[in-house]
Image (cartoon, rainbow, N blue to C red):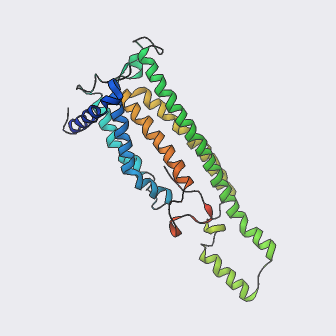
Amino acid sequence: MSVLTDPFTHLVTALAGLLEPLAAHSATAAAIVLITVLVRLALHPLSRAAARGATPVSGLLPLLLQLPVFWLMYRSFTTEGELLDHRLFAAPLGARWFEVLGEGGPFGAQGLVFLGLFGAIAVVAAWSAVRGRRSAAVAAAAAAEAAAAPKKSARRSGEPKGPARAAGTGAARATGGGGAAGLPELTAEQRELLRKVGSVLPLLSFGTLITAAVVPLAAGLYLLTTTAWSVAERAWLDRRPVGAGAGRPAGGAVRSSL
């Protein structure tokens, strides 16, 4: 064990000891879930900042800051040590899916644990894909509405003259000179590109299935927990105000989030 993985192993073992009365032989797996939840709770302020659109990179920080934890999880269950013998039901937490195929096949005792993991990840990925497509559709509709709003306003009121025209020009400058609610006007090509990207990005969530199939079961359990947290957190942040005044996008624009 390395200097970095030793403290992590001790943490997992200590939490497993606390959870053993509740989780019995799967206490270490429960400890992994608990560690993942604690990490995501610590990163929640960054997720809120991403939902407010505070900085361009705020949405990437929670993902990047989880990489060291995932690496420690991977190393702890691939290096010889006391955690390799711990199990989630019948499957060792250090086992990979292709390894357990020789222990009864995909429908054996160990294979069923992995199938359950894959099924749970698929459900979360499908939920994420549906929400992603809806968000992309709302974003495209908002961009189209922002582009059409000035034209509709001009047709209703006609071309203003004199002081009224000067006042209208000043208001347009105050809102950024773009479409409704200060949104930049997008060309037809940009809107079509936004639609195509929005239809493809949600499918990337299913890539977690491939990762879970090649990493140890413990790392796959971490992926399931953090992915489910991300989708639930995004849904929660989209349903409640994340800020007031300047922090909330004008005109009900879609907020970026994890």
Classify 110 as above or below 133. Answer: above
How many callouts does the rendering have? Answer: 0
Is residue 233 visible in the rendered image? The answer is yes
- Specify the quadrant of the image occupied by residue 217: top left
Q: Could you tell me residue 47's position as x and y percent?
A: 44, 53
Q: Nearer the viewer, residue 44 or 106?
A: 44
User: Which residue is found at the position 61% from the left and 41% from the top?
Assistant: 130
Evaluate whether residue 93 shows in this view: no
Q: Give the side of residue 74 with respect to residue 170, left or right.
A: left
Indicate left or right for 85 with 89 as reference.
Answer: left
194 up-or-down from 54: above or below: above
Residue 123 image position (x, y, % from top left): 54, 33
Judge by depth and name the residue closer to the eye, 129 or 241.
241
Q: Residue furthest bottom?
A: 163
For residue 168, what is the image quadrant? Answer: bottom right
Residue lying furthest front in this view? Answer: 21
Q: Position of residue 4 (x, y in %)?
A: 22, 39
Query: 36 or 57: nearer the eye?
Result: 36
